[in-house]
Image: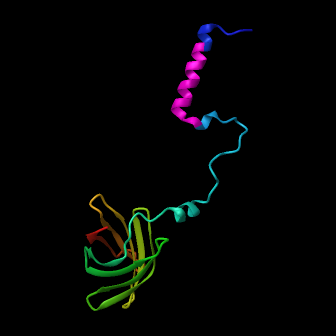
Amino acid sequence: MSMSRRTRKLLTTSAALILSAAGAGLTAPANAAPTVPATAPSTVREARAAGFNASGVWTIYQSNATVRIDLRQDGNGNLFGSTSSGNTVGTVQEGSVTGNDIYFIVQWNHGPRGRYTGSLGPDRRLSGITVDLNNPSSQATWRSDRTF
């Protein structure tokens, strides 16, 4: 049983449209192994390179304080350093830069633990939110004084 010329043309046109809309991924045989490696999301996150270097001494203008930051960033994007605000000092317990995002946790000498999360904006400044991990209802917005 042969197909009519019109049916063949319709099927060929339909297949071309489906492939162009869906991409070349549909051209593999149905029984072929997937070409995308099955990687855990955490592994993918760790493999994403830092998009900027946050090392150095800079200032965070919070909605409730001004904080001096002194950070070092290693080749994997991990952050280390210290902070101060007036007579209060803190130590960066953990932190990292991943892509255009930054986070770090500061243990302040007077008790609070602040988690700072933010991202690099189009103006190349960091901005975000800080939360007191001991009192999550205590939050403030922040932005960096310098560009990255």
Q: Quadrant of residue 95?
A: bottom left
| Number of numbered markers | 0
Residue 141 location (% of width, % of height): 30, 70
- Image-based side of 122 in relation to 41, left or right: left
Query: Is 17 colored magenta in this rendering?
Result: yes
Which residue does the image show at 29% across and 57% down from the upper left? 122
- Image-based side of 130 in relation to 63, left or right: right
Which residue does the image show at 67% across and 45% down from the upper left? 34
Which residue does the image show at 43% across and 62% down from the upper left? 99
Hey, which residue is sitting farthest front in the picture? 75
Locate the C terminus by quadrant: bottom left
- The figure's colour scheme reads rainbow
- Image-based side of 130 in relation to 30, left or right: left
Which residue does the image show at 34% across and 63% down from the upper left? 120
Magenta part of the chain: 9-24
Locate the N terminus by quadrant: top right
Query: Is 82 colored magenta in this rendering?
Result: no
Q: Look at the picture and state if 3 lies above or below 43.
A: above
Residue 7 location (% of width, % of height): 61, 12
Q: Look at the picture and state if 18 lies above or below 84.
A: above
Would you say the magenta stretch is mainly helix, strand or loop? helix
Residue 89 location (% of width, % of height): 34, 89
Q: Look at the picture and state if 30 lies above or below 140.
A: above
Residue 112 location (% of width, % of height): 39, 84
- Of 65 and 71, the residue lying toward us: 71
Q: Quadrant of residue 79?
A: bottom left
